[in-house]
Amino acid sequence: MIDQIIVVGYLVIVLIIGLMSGKNTTTIKDYAVGKRNFSNPVLTAGIAATMIAASGTAGLVGKIYHIGLISALAYFGVVVSRLMVAFVIAPKMSNFLGLISSGDILERLYGTKAKILIGLFTLVEGPLLAAAQILATYQAGQIFLVYQKKLQQY
């Protein structure tokens, strides 16, 4: 029971903070980038949270456990791609200041049809990603429940 109280309490606190913080938000641009007064630690934390996913932490550890240390070598490609983003792509992003989505960037580069196309792809991708996350959560829950039942038998 205490676990449920903690989770519900946390969700209520987050909801209250979100509602209080968003009172003055009137446009999508204001929602996406605010007033652009972020400190370096906040930006760093946001980028790190975006780039470091569960697959890069728990997923990698699981692969190393099942396959062996060779799977850590495969992660080297992720490191190379992040370095390419930092040194090749990021310096060229100044051309897109003020834009808030990949659709805006594609519109600037290729026109309105490209923005509409990326929007349609996003409409397809969003539900598919949500379904994959729901399936993964279900499977993790099943594994947990199976182990819990086996433990109760002993």
Image (spheres, helix red, strand yellow):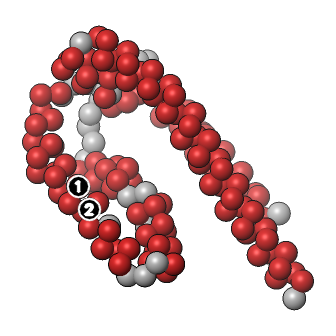
Residue at 59% across / 48% down in the picture?
133
- Residue projecting furthest to the bottom: 154
Quadrant assignment for the C terminus? bottom right
Q: Quadrant of residue 114?
A: top left
- Residue 24 in view, yes or no: no
- Whether residue 84 is visible: yes
Q: CA distance from mark 2 to mark 1?
A: 6 Å
Q: Which mark is residue 81?
A: 1
Determine whether the residue tagged by mark 2 lies in a helix, strand or loop: helix
Q: Is residue 121 left or right of residue 100?
A: right
Disc 2 designates what residue?
Answer: 77
- Crowd around label 2: few <14 · some 14–19 · many ≥20 (10 Å): few
- Give the residue displayed 32% in from the left and 67% down from the top: 75
Vertical placement of residue 35 versus 68, above or below: above
Q: Secondary structure at mark 1?
A: helix
Which amino acid type is marked by label 2? Gly
Which sits in the foreground, 116 or 94? 116
Q: Is residue 114 above or below residue 40?
A: above
- Residue type at mark 1: give it: Ser
Q: Quadrant of residue 122?
A: top left
Q: Residue at left 39%, top 54%?
A: 49
The quarter of the image holding the N terminus is bottom right
Disc 2 vs disc 1: Cβ atoms closer than 8 Å? Answer: yes
Q: Nearer the viewer, residue 6 or 84?
A: 84
Q: Residues within 10 Å of mark 1 (few under 14, many from 20)?
A: few
Q: Is residue 69 above or below residue 118?
A: below
Residue 139 in the image, given as x and y percentages of width and height: 69, 59
